[in-house]
Amino acid sequence: MNDKPIILKRPELRRYLVPINTAATQQLFTDCLIIGAGVAGLRAAIEAASRGCEVVLVCKRTLEDSNTWNAQGGIASVLGSDDTFASHIEDTLTTGCSINDRNTVEQVVKDGPELVRELLKWGAEFDKQKDGSIAITFEGGHSHARVAHALGDNTGKAIAQALLNKVRQFDNITIVENFYTIDLITNDEAGCIGVIGQNAKGAMEIIWAKTTILATGGAGRLYRETTNPEVATADGHAMAIRAGALMRDMEFMQFHPTTLYIAGASRALITETLRGEGAILRDINNYAFMADYHKDAELAPRDIASRAIHTQMLKTGATHVFLDIRHFDKEHFAKRFPLISEIVTSFDIDISKDLIPVRPSAHYMIGGVKTDMLARTNIANLLACGEVASTGLHGANRLGSNSLLEGLVFGRIAGRLAAEQGGRNGTSLKKFRCDIPKSDRSRLDTVDVLNSLRSLMWRNVGITRQEKPLAEAQEIISFWQRYVLDKVFDSPPGWECQNMLTVCQMMAKAAEARTESRGVHFRSDFPEENDIKFKTHIEFA
Ligand code: SIN
Protein backbone atom coordinates (compact mmCIF):
# COMPACT_ATOMS: atom_id res chain seq x y z
CA MET A 1 0.00 0.00 0.00
CA ASN A 2 1.10 3.58 -0.64
CA ASP A 3 1.62 5.09 2.84
CA LYS A 4 0.77 8.60 1.68
CA PRO A 5 -2.99 9.18 1.85
CA ILE A 6 -4.90 11.40 -0.54
CA ILE A 7 -6.00 14.43 1.47
CA LEU A 8 -9.32 16.19 0.93
CA LYS A 9 -10.29 19.42 2.62
CA ARG A 10 -12.54 18.92 5.63
CA PRO A 11 -15.82 20.87 5.61
CA GLU A 12 -16.09 24.14 7.48
CA LEU A 13 -18.78 23.64 10.05
CA ARG A 14 -20.19 25.42 13.04
CA ARG A 15 -18.29 23.99 16.02
CA TYR A 16 -21.31 23.03 18.16
CA LEU A 17 -24.88 22.15 17.22
CA VAL A 18 -26.29 23.80 20.34
CA PRO A 19 -25.32 26.74 22.52
CA ILE A 20 -23.40 25.73 25.65
CA ASN A 21 -23.51 27.53 28.96
CA THR A 22 -21.97 25.69 31.89
CA ALA A 23 -23.62 28.05 34.35
CA ALA A 24 -27.06 26.87 33.28
CA THR A 25 -26.44 23.18 32.58
CA GLN A 26 -26.36 20.20 34.90
CA GLN A 27 -23.01 18.45 35.02
CA LEU A 28 -21.60 15.02 35.78
CA PHE A 29 -17.94 14.03 36.22
CA THR A 30 -16.20 10.75 35.48
CA ASP A 31 -12.82 9.23 34.66
CA CYS A 32 -13.95 7.56 31.47
CA LEU A 33 -17.01 8.33 29.39
CA ILE A 34 -18.05 5.74 26.81
CA ILE A 35 -20.57 6.72 24.15
CA GLY A 36 -22.30 3.64 22.76
CA ALA A 37 -23.39 0.26 24.10
CA GLY A 38 -22.49 -2.06 21.24
CA VAL A 39 -19.78 -4.68 21.50
CA ALA A 40 -16.93 -2.15 21.45
CA GLY A 41 -18.39 0.17 24.09
CA LEU A 42 -19.33 -2.66 26.43
CA ARG A 43 -15.95 -4.38 26.12
CA ALA A 44 -14.19 -1.04 26.72
CA ALA A 45 -16.28 -0.45 29.85
CA ILE A 46 -15.39 -3.85 31.28
CA GLU A 47 -11.68 -3.34 30.66
CA ALA A 48 -11.55 0.18 32.07
CA ALA A 49 -13.64 -0.72 35.13
CA SER A 50 -11.66 -3.90 35.87
CA ARG A 51 -8.58 -1.66 36.12
CA GLY A 52 -10.19 0.64 38.67
CA CYS A 53 -11.46 3.36 36.38
CA GLU A 54 -14.79 5.01 37.08
CA VAL A 55 -16.91 4.62 33.93
CA VAL A 56 -20.08 6.28 32.66
CA LEU A 57 -21.52 4.53 29.62
CA VAL A 58 -24.23 6.41 27.73
CA CYS A 59 -26.35 5.17 24.85
CA LYS A 60 -28.74 6.94 22.55
CA ARG A 61 -31.79 4.81 23.27
CA THR A 62 -31.94 1.48 25.12
CA LEU A 63 -29.14 -1.05 25.48
CA GLU A 64 -30.84 -3.20 22.84
CA ASP A 65 -30.73 -0.53 20.15
CA SER A 66 -27.43 -1.30 18.44
CA ASN A 67 -26.07 -3.01 15.38
CA THR A 68 -24.37 -5.49 17.71
CA TRP A 69 -27.68 -6.59 19.17
CA ASN A 70 -29.00 -7.26 15.64
CA ALA A 71 -25.96 -9.12 14.30
CA GLN A 72 -27.01 -12.51 13.01
CA GLY A 73 -24.21 -14.43 11.31
CA GLY A 74 -21.48 -14.40 13.86
CA ILE A 75 -17.98 -13.59 14.90
CA ALA A 76 -15.00 -14.69 12.83
CA SER A 77 -12.02 -16.23 14.60
CA VAL A 78 -9.48 -19.00 14.15
CA LEU A 79 -11.12 -21.82 16.09
CA GLY A 80 -10.99 -24.81 13.71
CA SER A 81 -8.13 -27.31 13.93
CA ASP A 82 -7.26 -26.92 10.24
CA ASP A 83 -7.45 -23.10 10.30
CA THR A 84 -4.51 -20.75 10.86
CA PHE A 85 -3.91 -17.10 11.74
CA ALA A 86 -2.07 -16.75 8.43
CA SER A 87 -5.17 -17.84 6.55
CA HIS A 88 -7.54 -15.47 8.40
CA ILE A 89 -5.05 -12.63 7.88
CA GLU A 90 -4.76 -13.46 4.19
CA ASP A 91 -8.54 -13.62 3.68
CA THR A 92 -8.96 -10.24 5.44
CA LEU A 93 -6.26 -8.64 3.29
CA THR A 94 -7.51 -10.16 0.03
CA THR A 95 -11.08 -9.04 0.70
CA GLY A 96 -9.82 -5.57 1.73
CA CYS A 97 -8.19 -5.04 -1.70
CA SER A 98 -4.67 -4.18 -0.53
CA ILE A 99 -5.37 -1.12 1.58
CA ASN A 100 -5.81 -2.75 5.00
CA ASP A 101 -3.36 -1.90 7.74
CA ARG A 102 -1.43 -5.15 8.12
CA ASN A 103 -0.48 -4.54 11.77
CA THR A 104 -4.12 -4.02 12.68
CA VAL A 105 -5.18 -7.14 10.80
CA GLU A 106 -2.56 -9.24 12.59
CA GLN A 107 -3.49 -7.86 16.01
CA VAL A 108 -7.23 -8.45 15.54
CA VAL A 109 -6.84 -11.95 14.11
CA LYS A 110 -4.35 -13.07 16.77
CA ASP A 111 -6.40 -11.72 19.70
CA GLY A 112 -9.54 -13.38 18.32
CA PRO A 113 -9.62 -16.86 19.84
CA GLU A 114 -8.81 -15.59 23.35
CA LEU A 115 -11.58 -12.99 23.21
CA VAL A 116 -14.17 -15.42 21.84
CA ARG A 117 -13.35 -17.95 24.59
CA GLU A 118 -13.56 -15.15 27.17
CA LEU A 119 -17.10 -14.43 25.93
CA LEU A 120 -17.94 -18.10 26.32
CA LYS A 121 -16.66 -17.94 29.91
CA TRP A 122 -18.83 -14.87 30.51
CA GLY A 123 -21.90 -16.78 29.41
CA ALA A 124 -22.29 -16.19 25.65
CA GLU A 125 -24.25 -19.17 24.41
CA PHE A 126 -22.18 -20.09 21.37
CA ASP A 127 -23.58 -23.05 19.48
CA LYS A 128 -21.48 -26.17 19.98
CA GLN A 129 -20.50 -29.19 17.99
CA LYS A 130 -21.22 -32.71 19.27
CA ASP A 131 -17.74 -32.87 20.87
CA GLY A 132 -18.45 -29.69 22.87
CA SER A 133 -16.22 -27.39 20.82
CA ILE A 134 -17.58 -24.12 19.40
CA ALA A 135 -19.46 -24.71 16.11
CA ILE A 136 -18.06 -22.74 13.18
CA THR A 137 -19.39 -22.08 9.72
CA PHE A 138 -18.49 -20.47 6.39
CA GLU A 139 -19.20 -17.00 5.04
CA GLY A 140 -18.21 -15.35 1.76
CA GLY A 141 -14.48 -14.60 1.47
CA HIS A 142 -13.44 -17.00 4.25
CA SER A 143 -11.30 -19.89 3.07
CA HIS A 144 -12.03 -21.87 6.25
CA ALA A 145 -15.05 -22.36 8.45
CA ARG A 146 -14.38 -19.80 11.20
CA VAL A 147 -17.63 -17.98 11.95
CA ALA A 148 -18.86 -18.79 15.46
CA HIS A 149 -22.56 -18.25 16.09
CA ALA A 150 -24.80 -18.19 19.13
CA LEU A 151 -28.47 -18.98 19.72
CA GLY A 152 -28.57 -19.91 16.02
CA ASP A 153 -28.73 -16.59 14.20
CA ASN A 154 -29.02 -14.43 17.33
CA THR A 155 -25.28 -14.09 17.77
CA GLY A 156 -25.18 -10.36 18.43
CA LYS A 157 -27.83 -10.53 21.12
CA ALA A 158 -26.07 -13.44 22.87
CA ILE A 159 -22.75 -11.57 22.85
CA ALA A 160 -24.29 -8.30 24.02
CA GLN A 161 -26.14 -10.06 26.84
CA ALA A 162 -22.96 -11.78 28.04
CA LEU A 163 -21.08 -8.48 27.99
CA LEU A 164 -23.92 -6.70 29.77
CA ASN A 165 -24.04 -9.33 32.50
CA LYS A 166 -20.34 -8.78 33.01
CA VAL A 167 -20.75 -4.97 32.96
CA ARG A 168 -23.39 -5.22 35.68
CA GLN A 169 -20.88 -6.90 38.01
CA PHE A 170 -18.94 -3.63 38.30
CA ASP A 171 -20.05 -0.98 40.79
CA ASN A 172 -17.83 1.54 39.02
CA ILE A 173 -19.82 1.43 35.74
CA THR A 174 -22.89 3.65 35.49
CA ILE A 175 -25.15 3.01 32.51
CA VAL A 176 -27.24 5.89 31.21
CA GLU A 177 -29.83 5.01 28.58
CA ASN A 178 -31.72 7.47 26.38
CA PHE A 179 -28.89 10.00 26.51
CA TYR A 180 -28.49 11.69 23.13
CA THR A 181 -24.89 12.90 22.82
CA ILE A 182 -24.90 16.09 20.78
CA ASP A 183 -21.26 17.14 20.71
CA LEU A 184 -17.80 16.40 22.02
CA ILE A 185 -16.43 19.33 24.02
CA THR A 186 -12.82 20.10 23.22
CA ASN A 187 -10.20 22.73 23.94
CA ASP A 188 -6.68 23.34 22.68
CA GLU A 189 -4.89 22.32 25.86
CA ALA A 190 -6.63 19.09 26.88
CA GLY A 191 -8.23 17.84 23.68
CA CYS A 192 -11.55 16.18 24.42
CA ILE A 193 -12.82 16.90 27.90
CA GLY A 194 -16.37 15.63 27.72
CA VAL A 195 -19.67 15.95 25.93
CA ILE A 196 -22.91 17.83 25.89
CA GLY A 197 -26.08 15.85 25.42
CA GLN A 198 -29.76 15.64 26.18
CA ASN A 199 -30.79 13.26 28.94
CA ALA A 200 -33.89 11.10 29.21
CA LYS A 201 -35.81 13.93 30.88
CA GLY A 202 -35.11 16.21 27.92
CA ALA A 203 -32.63 18.37 29.87
CA MET A 204 -29.22 19.42 28.59
CA GLU A 205 -26.40 17.79 30.50
CA ILE A 206 -22.61 18.01 30.32
CA ILE A 207 -20.50 14.98 31.20
CA TRP A 208 -16.85 15.85 31.89
CA ALA A 209 -14.34 13.04 31.52
CA LYS A 210 -10.60 12.53 31.55
CA THR A 211 -10.98 10.10 28.60
CA THR A 212 -13.86 9.88 26.16
CA ILE A 213 -14.33 6.71 24.11
CA LEU A 214 -16.43 7.10 20.99
CA ALA A 215 -18.17 3.80 20.26
CA THR A 216 -21.31 5.12 18.61
CA GLY A 217 -21.56 2.56 15.81
CA GLY A 218 -22.61 2.93 12.23
CA ALA A 219 -24.35 4.90 9.55
CA GLY A 220 -26.68 2.57 7.62
CA ARG A 221 -29.62 4.94 8.12
CA LEU A 222 -28.03 7.37 5.69
CA TYR A 223 -29.52 5.10 3.02
CA ARG A 224 -33.10 4.35 2.12
CA GLU A 225 -32.35 0.61 2.07
CA THR A 226 -30.49 -0.64 5.13
CA THR A 227 -30.16 -3.50 7.57
CA ASN A 228 -29.38 -1.05 10.39
CA PRO A 229 -31.61 -0.06 13.32
CA GLU A 230 -33.02 3.47 13.62
CA VAL A 231 -30.18 4.63 15.88
CA ALA A 232 -27.50 4.19 13.18
CA THR A 233 -27.51 7.79 11.98
CA ALA A 234 -23.76 8.52 12.03
CA ASP A 235 -23.97 10.83 15.06
CA GLY A 236 -20.53 9.77 16.28
CA HIS A 237 -18.98 10.37 12.88
CA ALA A 238 -20.52 13.83 12.71
CA MET A 239 -19.58 14.98 16.20
CA ALA A 240 -15.99 13.79 15.58
CA ILE A 241 -15.90 15.78 12.32
CA ARG A 242 -17.06 18.94 14.13
CA ALA A 243 -14.44 18.39 16.82
CA GLY A 244 -11.66 18.18 14.21
CA ALA A 245 -11.02 14.42 14.06
CA LEU A 246 -9.24 13.01 11.04
CA MET A 247 -11.75 11.04 8.99
CA ARG A 248 -10.73 8.25 6.65
CA ASP A 249 -12.27 5.92 4.02
CA MET A 250 -15.60 7.76 3.96
CA GLU A 251 -16.35 6.42 0.45
CA PHE A 252 -16.49 2.85 1.72
CA MET A 253 -20.03 1.86 2.71
CA GLN A 254 -20.53 -1.89 2.61
CA PHE A 255 -23.77 -3.19 1.13
CA HIS A 256 -25.07 -6.50 2.43
CA PRO A 257 -26.20 -8.70 -0.46
CA THR A 258 -29.32 -10.16 1.08
CA THR A 259 -31.94 -8.09 2.85
CA LEU A 260 -35.51 -9.32 2.87
CA TYR A 261 -37.41 -7.35 0.24
CA ILE A 262 -41.13 -7.08 0.80
CA ALA A 263 -42.52 -3.73 -0.28
CA GLY A 264 -43.73 -1.80 2.73
CA ALA A 265 -42.03 -4.03 5.30
CA SER A 266 -38.87 -3.00 7.13
CA ARG A 267 -35.71 -4.48 5.63
CA ALA A 268 -34.64 -7.45 7.73
CA LEU A 269 -31.14 -8.85 7.31
CA ILE A 270 -31.02 -12.37 5.92
CA THR A 271 -27.68 -13.64 7.18
CA GLU A 272 -24.89 -14.50 4.81
CA THR A 273 -24.32 -17.77 6.67
CA LEU A 274 -27.40 -19.08 4.86
CA ARG A 275 -25.32 -18.96 1.68
CA GLY A 276 -22.40 -20.34 3.66
CA GLU A 277 -24.61 -23.32 4.41
CA GLY A 278 -25.95 -23.88 0.90
CA ALA A 279 -28.58 -21.26 -0.01
CA ILE A 280 -28.67 -20.42 -3.72
CA LEU A 281 -29.32 -17.02 -5.31
CA ARG A 282 -31.76 -17.07 -8.24
CA ASP A 283 -33.08 -14.25 -10.40
CA ILE A 284 -36.78 -13.83 -11.14
CA ASN A 285 -36.39 -16.27 -14.06
CA ASN A 286 -35.19 -18.91 -11.60
CA TYR A 287 -31.65 -18.70 -12.97
CA ALA A 288 -28.83 -19.34 -10.46
CA PHE A 289 -26.53 -16.55 -11.61
CA MET A 290 -23.71 -16.27 -9.08
CA ALA A 291 -21.31 -18.59 -10.94
CA ASP A 292 -21.40 -16.05 -13.81
CA TYR A 293 -19.82 -13.48 -11.50
CA HIS A 294 -17.30 -15.32 -9.31
CA LYS A 295 -15.60 -18.70 -9.14
CA ASP A 296 -16.88 -19.18 -5.57
CA ALA A 297 -20.46 -18.44 -6.71
CA GLU A 298 -22.63 -17.97 -3.57
CA LEU A 299 -19.48 -17.73 -1.42
CA ALA A 300 -18.05 -14.75 -3.31
CA PRO A 301 -17.06 -11.76 -1.13
CA ARG A 302 -19.86 -9.38 -0.24
CA ASP A 303 -19.04 -6.59 -2.66
CA ILE A 304 -19.10 -8.98 -5.59
CA ALA A 305 -22.30 -10.66 -4.42
CA SER A 306 -24.03 -7.28 -3.91
CA ARG A 307 -23.01 -6.01 -7.35
CA ALA A 308 -23.94 -9.30 -9.00
CA ILE A 309 -27.43 -9.10 -7.50
CA HIS A 310 -27.75 -5.46 -8.48
CA THR A 311 -26.65 -6.20 -12.07
CA GLN A 312 -29.01 -9.17 -12.31
CA MET A 313 -31.88 -7.01 -11.04
CA LEU A 314 -31.13 -4.48 -13.79
CA LYS A 315 -30.83 -7.21 -16.44
CA THR A 316 -34.18 -8.73 -15.51
CA GLY A 317 -35.92 -5.44 -14.71
CA ALA A 318 -36.84 -6.77 -11.27
CA THR A 319 -36.82 -5.11 -7.84
CA HIS A 320 -35.19 -8.13 -6.21
CA VAL A 321 -33.75 -11.62 -6.62
CA PHE A 322 -34.48 -14.71 -4.53
CA LEU A 323 -32.70 -16.87 -1.99
CA ASP A 324 -33.55 -20.50 -2.51
CA ILE A 325 -33.40 -22.71 0.58
CA ARG A 326 -36.11 -25.13 -0.47
CA HIS A 327 -33.58 -27.96 -0.16
CA PHE A 328 -32.92 -27.17 3.54
CA ASP A 329 -34.34 -29.45 6.19
CA LYS A 330 -37.19 -27.38 7.61
CA GLU A 331 -36.78 -28.53 11.20
CA HIS A 332 -33.04 -27.98 11.17
CA PHE A 333 -33.55 -24.53 9.61
CA ALA A 334 -35.94 -23.49 12.36
CA LYS A 335 -33.38 -24.51 15.00
CA ARG A 336 -30.27 -23.17 13.29
CA PHE A 337 -31.85 -19.89 12.09
CA PRO A 338 -34.68 -19.17 14.56
CA LEU A 339 -34.72 -15.42 13.92
CA ILE A 340 -34.98 -15.70 10.14
CA SER A 341 -37.44 -18.56 10.50
CA GLU A 342 -39.66 -16.26 12.57
CA ILE A 343 -39.28 -13.38 10.11
CA VAL A 344 -40.11 -15.38 6.97
CA THR A 345 -42.97 -17.18 8.68
CA SER A 346 -44.45 -13.81 9.66
CA PHE A 347 -44.68 -13.05 5.92
CA ASP A 348 -46.21 -16.46 5.14
CA ILE A 349 -43.10 -17.66 3.35
CA ASP A 350 -42.87 -21.45 3.57
CA ILE A 351 -39.17 -22.13 2.99
CA SER A 352 -39.81 -25.66 1.70
CA LYS A 353 -41.93 -24.28 -1.17
CA ASP A 354 -41.33 -20.54 -1.51
CA LEU A 355 -38.33 -18.49 -2.51
CA ILE A 356 -37.22 -15.60 -0.25
CA PRO A 357 -37.20 -12.19 -2.01
CA VAL A 358 -33.98 -10.32 -1.24
CA ARG A 359 -31.88 -7.42 -2.42
CA PRO A 360 -28.77 -5.58 -1.21
CA SER A 361 -28.84 -2.73 1.28
CA ALA A 362 -26.45 -0.49 3.22
CA HIS A 363 -24.99 -2.50 6.06
CA TYR A 364 -21.62 -1.44 7.45
CA MET A 365 -19.74 1.86 7.42
CA ILE A 366 -16.07 1.08 6.87
CA GLY A 367 -15.05 4.73 7.00
CA GLY A 368 -14.72 6.65 10.21
CA VAL A 369 -12.45 8.32 12.73
CA LYS A 370 -8.85 7.44 12.03
CA THR A 371 -7.30 5.59 14.97
CA ASP A 372 -3.94 4.05 15.74
CA MET A 373 -3.10 0.69 17.31
CA LEU A 374 -4.05 2.07 20.74
CA ALA A 375 -7.46 3.33 19.56
CA ARG A 376 -6.19 6.93 19.78
CA THR A 377 -7.54 9.60 17.46
CA ASN A 378 -5.70 12.80 16.53
CA ILE A 379 -7.58 14.54 19.39
CA ALA A 380 -5.98 14.09 22.82
CA ASN A 381 -8.08 12.06 25.27
CA LEU A 382 -10.51 10.98 22.55
CA LEU A 383 -10.39 7.28 21.69
CA ALA A 384 -12.60 5.52 19.16
CA CYS A 385 -13.49 1.88 18.59
CA GLY A 386 -16.07 -0.23 16.78
CA GLU A 387 -17.84 0.83 13.60
CA VAL A 388 -17.26 4.58 14.11
CA ALA A 389 -13.49 4.02 14.02
CA SER A 390 -11.31 3.48 11.00
CA THR A 391 -8.67 1.14 12.38
CA GLY A 392 -7.52 -0.05 8.97
CA LEU A 393 -8.73 -3.61 9.59
CA HIS A 394 -11.18 -3.76 6.71
CA GLY A 395 -9.34 -2.00 3.90
CA ALA A 396 -11.79 -1.32 1.09
CA ASN A 397 -14.12 -4.19 1.96
CA ARG A 398 -14.95 -5.84 5.27
CA LEU A 399 -14.70 -9.59 5.52
CA GLY A 400 -18.03 -10.81 6.96
CA SER A 401 -18.13 -11.29 10.74
CA ASN A 402 -14.82 -9.49 11.33
CA SER A 403 -16.51 -6.48 12.90
CA LEU A 404 -17.75 -7.99 16.17
CA LEU A 405 -14.21 -9.24 16.60
CA GLU A 406 -12.75 -5.82 15.86
CA GLY A 407 -15.11 -4.29 18.43
CA LEU A 408 -13.91 -6.70 21.11
CA VAL A 409 -10.23 -6.22 20.32
CA PHE A 410 -10.23 -2.43 20.10
CA GLY A 411 -12.80 -2.06 22.88
CA ARG A 412 -10.39 -3.86 25.18
CA ILE A 413 -7.47 -1.74 23.96
CA ALA A 414 -9.40 1.50 24.44
CA GLY A 415 -10.61 0.51 27.92
CA ARG A 416 -7.07 -0.38 28.96
CA LEU A 417 -5.68 2.95 27.76
CA ALA A 418 -8.48 4.88 29.45
CA ALA A 419 -7.60 3.22 32.74
CA GLU A 420 -3.92 4.01 32.22
CA GLN A 421 -4.74 7.65 31.51
CA GLY A 422 -5.99 7.85 35.06
CA GLY A 423 -8.60 9.83 36.95
CA ARG A 424 -10.35 12.99 36.05
CA ASN A 425 -8.24 15.36 38.18
CA GLY A 426 -10.75 18.15 37.92
CA THR A 427 -11.15 17.91 34.15
CA SER A 428 -13.84 20.43 33.28
CA LEU A 429 -14.28 23.96 32.14
CA LYS A 430 -15.60 25.79 35.16
CA LYS A 431 -17.05 28.51 33.00
CA PHE A 432 -17.74 27.96 29.33
CA ARG A 433 -20.20 29.70 27.12
CA CYS A 434 -20.76 29.34 23.41
CA ASP A 435 -23.64 31.21 21.80
CA ILE A 436 -25.07 30.67 18.32
CA PRO A 437 -26.62 33.54 16.35
CA LYS A 438 -30.21 33.09 15.20
CA SER A 439 -30.65 32.05 11.57
CA ASP A 440 -32.71 34.29 9.30
CA ARG A 441 -33.13 31.65 6.56
CA SER A 442 -36.39 29.76 6.11
CA ARG A 443 -36.94 26.45 7.83
CA LEU A 444 -37.09 23.21 5.84
CA ASP A 445 -39.13 20.24 6.99
CA THR A 446 -36.38 17.97 8.34
CA VAL A 447 -38.47 14.79 7.97
CA ASP A 448 -38.88 15.61 4.30
CA VAL A 449 -35.17 16.40 3.93
CA LEU A 450 -34.21 13.13 5.58
CA ASN A 451 -36.43 10.99 3.38
CA SER A 452 -35.11 12.72 0.28
CA LEU A 453 -31.51 12.49 1.53
CA ARG A 454 -31.75 8.75 2.11
CA SER A 455 -33.23 8.21 -1.36
CA LEU A 456 -30.56 10.43 -2.90
CA MET A 457 -27.79 8.46 -1.19
CA TRP A 458 -29.29 5.19 -2.39
CA ARG A 459 -29.56 6.43 -5.98
CA ASN A 460 -26.40 8.52 -6.34
CA VAL A 461 -23.94 7.20 -3.74
CA GLY A 462 -25.07 3.58 -3.77
CA ILE A 463 -23.75 0.25 -5.01
CA THR A 464 -22.76 1.66 -8.43
CA ARG A 465 -21.41 5.21 -8.63
CA GLN A 466 -20.56 7.66 -11.41
CA GLU A 467 -19.11 11.15 -11.57
CA LYS A 468 -22.25 13.10 -12.52
CA PRO A 469 -24.63 11.63 -9.94
CA LEU A 470 -21.95 12.03 -7.24
CA ALA A 471 -21.47 15.70 -8.13
CA GLU A 472 -25.23 16.19 -8.24
CA ALA A 473 -25.61 14.58 -4.80
CA GLN A 474 -23.11 17.07 -3.33
CA GLU A 475 -24.91 19.99 -4.90
CA ILE A 476 -28.29 18.93 -3.53
CA ILE A 477 -26.87 18.17 -0.08
CA SER A 478 -25.16 21.59 -0.02
CA PHE A 479 -28.50 23.22 -0.70
CA TRP A 480 -30.15 21.37 2.21
CA GLN A 481 -27.15 22.11 4.42
CA ARG A 482 -27.57 25.85 3.91
CA TYR A 483 -31.06 25.69 5.40
CA VAL A 484 -30.53 23.03 8.08
CA LEU A 485 -27.01 23.44 9.45
CA ASP A 486 -27.54 27.08 10.41
CA LYS A 487 -30.43 26.24 12.77
CA VAL A 488 -30.47 25.31 16.43
CA PHE A 489 -32.70 22.33 17.15
CA ASP A 490 -33.85 21.13 20.53
CA SER A 491 -34.44 17.44 19.95
CA PRO A 492 -32.77 14.40 18.31
CA PRO A 493 -34.57 14.43 14.91
CA GLY A 494 -33.14 17.88 14.13
CA TRP A 495 -29.61 17.00 15.33
CA GLU A 496 -29.74 13.71 13.42
CA CYS A 497 -30.67 15.56 10.26
CA GLN A 498 -27.70 17.92 10.73
CA ASN A 499 -25.37 14.98 11.39
CA MET A 500 -26.59 12.97 8.41
CA LEU A 501 -26.21 15.89 6.01
CA THR A 502 -22.65 16.44 7.24
CA VAL A 503 -21.58 12.82 6.87
CA CYS A 504 -23.38 12.20 3.55
CA GLN A 505 -21.64 15.19 1.99
CA MET A 506 -18.22 13.81 2.94
CA MET A 507 -19.12 10.34 1.66
CA ALA A 508 -20.19 11.72 -1.71
CA LYS A 509 -17.08 13.86 -1.92
CA ALA A 510 -14.73 10.97 -1.14
CA ALA A 511 -16.59 8.72 -3.58
CA GLU A 512 -16.19 11.34 -6.30
CA ALA A 513 -12.48 11.72 -5.55
CA ARG A 514 -11.75 7.97 -5.81
CA THR A 515 -11.84 7.65 -9.60
CA GLU A 516 -11.33 3.90 -9.59
CA SER A 517 -13.18 0.83 -8.29
CA ARG A 518 -11.92 -0.90 -5.18
CA GLY A 519 -13.77 -3.17 -2.75
CA VAL A 520 -17.19 -1.83 -1.88
CA HIS A 521 -16.64 1.34 -3.92
CA PHE A 522 -17.63 0.68 -7.53
CA ARG A 523 -17.40 3.42 -10.17
CA SER A 524 -19.03 2.36 -13.43
CA ASP A 525 -17.02 5.12 -15.17
CA PHE A 526 -13.75 3.77 -13.68
CA PRO A 527 -14.44 0.04 -13.29
CA GLU A 528 -10.84 -1.05 -12.62
CA GLU A 529 -8.52 -0.69 -9.63
CA ASN A 530 -5.90 1.99 -10.20
CA ASP A 531 -3.00 0.99 -7.96
CA ILE A 532 -0.72 3.76 -9.13
CA LYS A 533 -3.01 6.51 -7.84
CA PHE A 534 -5.36 4.89 -5.37
CA LYS A 535 -3.73 2.03 -3.48
CA THR A 536 -4.11 4.20 -0.42
CA HIS A 537 -6.66 5.89 1.82
CA ILE A 538 -8.58 9.11 1.32
CA GLU A 539 -8.52 11.30 4.41
CA PHE A 540 -10.22 14.54 5.36
CA ALA A 541 -7.79 16.81 7.17
C1 SIN B 1 -24.57 -11.55 8.33
O1 SIN B 1 -24.99 -12.28 9.20
O2 SIN B 1 -24.64 -11.82 7.13
C2 SIN B 1 -23.91 -10.26 8.73
C3 SIN B 1 -22.64 -10.53 9.42
C4 SIN B 1 -21.71 -9.37 9.24
O3 SIN B 1 -22.13 -8.33 8.78
O4 SIN B 1 -20.53 -9.51 9.54
Image (tube, helix red, strand yellow):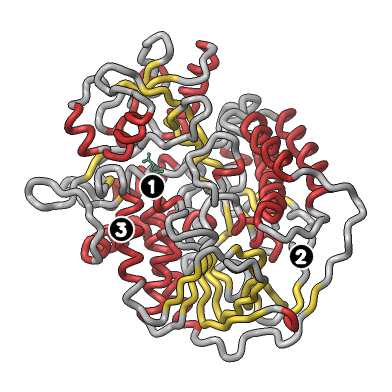
- Who is closer to the viewer here, 383 or 489? 489
Q: Which residue is mark 3?
A: 112
Among all residues in the image, which is located at the extreme left?
131
Quadrant position of residue 152: top left
Q: Which residue is mark 2?
A: 15
In the image, what residue type sits under mark 2?
Arg
Q: Earlier in the sequence, mark 2 or mark 3?
A: 2
Viewer-nearest of labels 2 and 3? Answer: 2
Q: Earlier in the sequence, mark 1 or mark 2?
A: 2
In the image, what residue type sits under mark 3?
Gly
User: Looking at the rendering, in which quadrant would you find the C terminus?
Assistant: bottom right
Q: Which residue is mark 1?
A: 71
- Name the secondary structure under disc 2: loop
Instruction: Give above or below for 105 relative to 45.
Output: above
In the image, what residue type sits under mark 1?
Ala
Q: Position of residue 436 (x, y in %)?
A: 84, 66
